[in-house]
Every structure is written in C-alpha cells, then in structure tokens.
Image: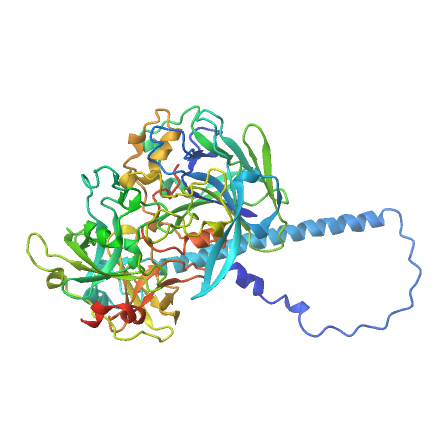
Amino acid sequence: MNYNQAAKLPPPSHTRGPAPVPAPAPVPAPPPVEPYGRQDLVMGTMRKLLEQRAGVARNLVEIDMQLEYLFYDLNSKKDDPQDVETYDGTLGVTREFVSDYERPVGQLQWTDLTGRFQADGEDQGNVSGQRWGSGALISDDLFLTAGHCFRQEFRSWKVPERNGIPISPAEIAPLMCVCFNFQIDGETGQTRPEVCYPVIELVECSPSPDDPHSTADYAIVRLGRDEKSGTLPGKMFGNLHVAKTDLTVKNASLCIIQHPNRKEKKVEAGHLLEIRDGRIAYNDIGTFGGASGAPILNGITGEVVGVHIKGGALPIGGFNSGTTIGAIRAKSKALASL
Amino acid sequence: MYTVNFIGLNYFNACKVGERDVLVPNGTPGSGKDDDQIPEHFASLFIEEDLCANDDWWPEHKQVRPVRLEIKLGEFRTANVIEFRIPAKPDPYTEPAAVRFSCRDRTLTNLNLDDGLPKLQTMGFVLDDRPDAIAKVPLPGGALEVFRFGGATLVRWLISDHDDPITITAHDGKATKRVVLKKSDSQLPAEIVFSNTVDLLAPLMSPAGNGKSQNMSVLGGAMAGMNTDAAGSMHNHGAAGHFVLYAKLDKDRNEQKFESPKIPDAMKLKSALFSNAYLSYLSSLDETPDPPCSGGCC
C-alpha cells in the first residue's frame, strides 16, 4: 500500500449509493430562543470534535506511513541482489541458471595510474584504481559493457586530462582492465582471488565524440591475455551468447548479473516491463552504481538481450533501464561478425 | 507531518547531553588545507516549487532548477525544484548559518543511525569548539532514520508536530531568511531535501571534451558561486573521496584521520522511500559509481 493507493480507497460505505430523496421543505419556523450558553456549549463540542478529527487524521497518516514501511520492507528484500555462489534460487531464476551464466560476467576497473600523467599539462584525475562497471564476455576476448563507462566527463569523477581536455574514450579504455572471479566463495564465505585481463582496445563505443547523441549506450572492448597463463579470458571463463533479436514479451523473465555498488558479483532477477525505441525497462530488478554495463539475460535461455544502463526503480514507481540487443546489433559490426 | 532528507556530507552530532544538531562541513572553496583539491560542495535545500508558498531567500543564492524525470520509456515530465543555497562563509571562523525547521516535537528518536552511519569518533575525531561548518541544523525532536539511497545513505528526519504552515529559517549572522511552505491537504508528507554535495545538477560538458558546458542555459543561468566548470577543481583522494571534508569539523583539522573511513554496508539498510523530484532524479542516473561525497556520519 502507498499513499496514492490510500488516497484512492473508496469513501466509507455510508457515503456511497444514490443520494436520499430530500423530504419536502417544511415551512420555516421562527428560530427558537436559545437559552443563554447553549450556543457556546455547541461550539465547544464542535471544536472538540474537530480536534479529535484532526487527531484521527494525523494518526491515519502515521498508520499509512507504517504500513508503507512494512510494505516496502517486504518488497525491498525482493530487490536485494544475492551473491552468485550462495544464491538461494528465490529471485525468479534457478540456482543452476546462475551457475551456468555467471562466470563470463566481469568487473571493469581503472588500473593504478600512479606515475602516469605527470608531464606538464597532464592531470591524472581521481579515478585511479576505481572499480567502475560491469559487463560480460561475448567471445574469447570481446567484452560487452556500457558506453558511458568510457565517458570523458562525470559530475564527481575526473578522468585523466591533457591541457585541460579529458583524454578520449579510445585512450581511456586501455587504462582499464576487466577482472573476473570477484565474488564470494560459496564454501568459504571469502572473496575469491580476482583474475584480471588488460583492455587493449576500444572496439566500439556509443555514444562517442563522433556520435554524441546516440541513444544506444554500449561498448565493446578487446581484452588481452592473462599475464601468468597467457590465455584469453574466454578460455578460462567462457562467454555468453548474444540474442539475435529483441525479447519483446511483456513480463518475460530477466536476470542481471552485476557488480552492484562496486562489490562482489551478485545476481538479481525480475520481469520485462516495457521495450521501446531501443531501450528495455524493468522495475523489479535491483541495481546500483557500478552495475552499468551488466548483461541483461533472458531468464529462460540465458541469452544477452540488453546492457544495463540506468537506475530509477522505486517501490512507488519508476524503472531501471538498459539498451536492447536490437539497438546494439543495429550499430555493431563486431557483433555481426561473431 | 513532513520529512527533511539529508544527503551528502552531514555530521549528526549527539556527542554530549543537550547537543542535538546536524553540523554541515564547509565544502566551499577558500577554507581548509586542501582547498585546491576538493571540489566545491554546496549546502542547499531542495524543495519542489509547487510546495513553496513564499520566501525571502538571498536572491543570488536561490534558483529554480528544472529536473527531467522519465515517467515511462521515452516519456518525460519536468519538475521544477527550487534550490535554496546557504551562502558561503567569508572565512572558516565565521559561525555557521543556523537553519531551523518548524518542529514542535520535543523527543528525538534515533532509530538506527549508530548502525547505518560511519562513526567519526572511531577515527579519532574530536569535535572542534569552532568547527568550520557552513550550517548547523538543530534537531529538537522527531525521528531520525538512515536508509539506503543508491549505493550510499540518506538520513530521514521525520517531524510529526510542527507549526502550520511549515517554515524554514536560515540566519547567517546578519540576516534571517525564510521559506514558507504551502498548507497541503495531501496525505503525503512534504519532503524537503537538505544536501551537502557537489553540484549534481550541473550539466556535463560536451562529449567531445572541449571543456565547454553544452547546455548551461537550460538551467537559466548560474547562481553566485556556482562552479560552471564542475570538474575543474577535482582532486584525487581515491577511495576516501570527499569524506576528508569532515576534517573541517575536527579539532586538529587532520584530513589523514578520514582517508580510510570504515563505512557500513549501505546494502544492509532499507531503501529510502520518497516522491521528491530531486531525489527521484538522482536515483535515475547512469549507474556508474556513486559520487564520492555521498553519505552522512555520526
């Protein structure tokens, strides 16, 4: 229940139904002479009743608020992502589903920029080492994520600059790496050691300086080999299959495997609310800062049907949203070649 | 009944008997040890225009700020939110502005601040007798509760009993300014936001990175002190982010104490519930990591 619903409740039953037929108006009689003090008594009683009424109204608001808290308590738990390895199977997809599809999901991070951008006119910014976004392998070495992760300006973060101008997305990307296995070990409860791969190239990015108004927010980066094993990430962690077409069925099952709040990998699931103009919306899948770029999976097939971009879902409205795979395919040469 | 929702850097002070207030560290430029590294922070009230009856706020520190909210995919509405900004202090030793909210509640209930907010005392914090706070908000009564807001926290102050109409006053030592809210028949309590963050409504520059703001005119001009080059004075405090600004309240003014704060996991808190347009806007941004100035402490 929320205030809006409370406001829509029908009025008390005694006020419903057709209005009673008024009786014929009696011939007005001269007003009786009230005994002294009776009017004061009536007015006093009315004042008391009005005060009581105000008190009841105030209590009702407080009760509504408490109901809302309780209502939200129930729902907020539903929107809490769970660690992938200890997932209890209650969010809408099975434990097996999560186990099958979580490994290729990784975290985009800024590398340690210590010692970099020290020349005259250069500024390192404030992003060194920051855990940044989410994404997923779609081949042995291609990683699908959000385009805005490579944006040059943020309101509170500053990417490296030269002469006051932020470096380009193509230069930003190789300053990042993608780490897998950043997740809680289901047996020990400890964070697993991460395995990180350098970003060697920004293959595609939208929007970009050349296409600043594109509404398809996505990027594909190419990852290098692991320093120790010399293997590409897909050989170690596999990759997700990208859907050929959009999922358009309202209420279809969706799953987002993500690094919410820059923390260990987690899973959330829910339903497709709406799809329109290359964007996909969902209002029952909890996501947080750091989830940008996470794959939106078809909750049945495990195919990637979009890339998570924005928050906004609240218990009393709003929605989260991402870019549809159709919108990405319409722009991407890399996906066409897979 | 109404709520004041605190976001950003705000210290909930209840160290000694009788002290019940919020101290807002001064993040405006020109004070502190690292004034060239911390971006400008603003202590502001954000109130939806429809809620405001009248005010006599400092004109150069008041601005209608339209926020664009997506109602359905591709369908937007614009809500006008008025930012009432606390003026910058002339020097760090000037007394903070006293910001008072209508409140007749006389019992202050702390529902979960100790569990949900980082505790400065555990970091060696000693409240200065003359802290460099830009504002001080007395908390005579009501209920305080911390919620999750994105990946950070929001502290809600619920006031049940108050004068009607609700009035907010700010006294900067020279003048007393006030904002009066409309009387509302709505069952929804009025929601006021008290924020101490960087300017989160400042437009981003052009994607080409030429350093020029691309749509400043949308905001109808700039307020006094507004940093139109929002990223121009950023810093590198790493994971500590802007938390070191709490040193402004510390007796030693020692930023090092606050460079590795232990911040409770906001994911364990209930999510904040609100209908305020400014909060709705902030919750609907791209989900890159939250700004590093998000979160109060006690």
Q: Quadrant of residue B260?
A: top left
Q: Is residue B13 visible?
A: no
Residue reaching furthest left? A229
Count the marks: how many? Answer: 0
Q: Is residue A64 visible?
A: yes
Task: Name the colour scheme.
Answer: rainbow
Residue A144 higher or lower than A276, as above or below: above
Question: x, y percentage for residue A32?
Answer: 91, 56
For the residue pair A219 and B72, the one nearer the viewer reads as A219
Asked whether, in this view, residue B75 is left or right of residue A256, the answer is: right
Question: x, y percentage for residue A151?
Answer: 30, 53
Residue A205 higher or lower than A191, as above or below: below
Question: x, y percentage for residue A246?
Answer: 31, 74
Question: x, y percentage for residue A146?
Answer: 28, 59
Asked whether, in this view, residue A19 is left or right of residue B173, the answer is: right
Q: Quadrant of residue A279?
A: bottom left
For the residue pair A96 and B41, the one nearer the viewer reads as B41
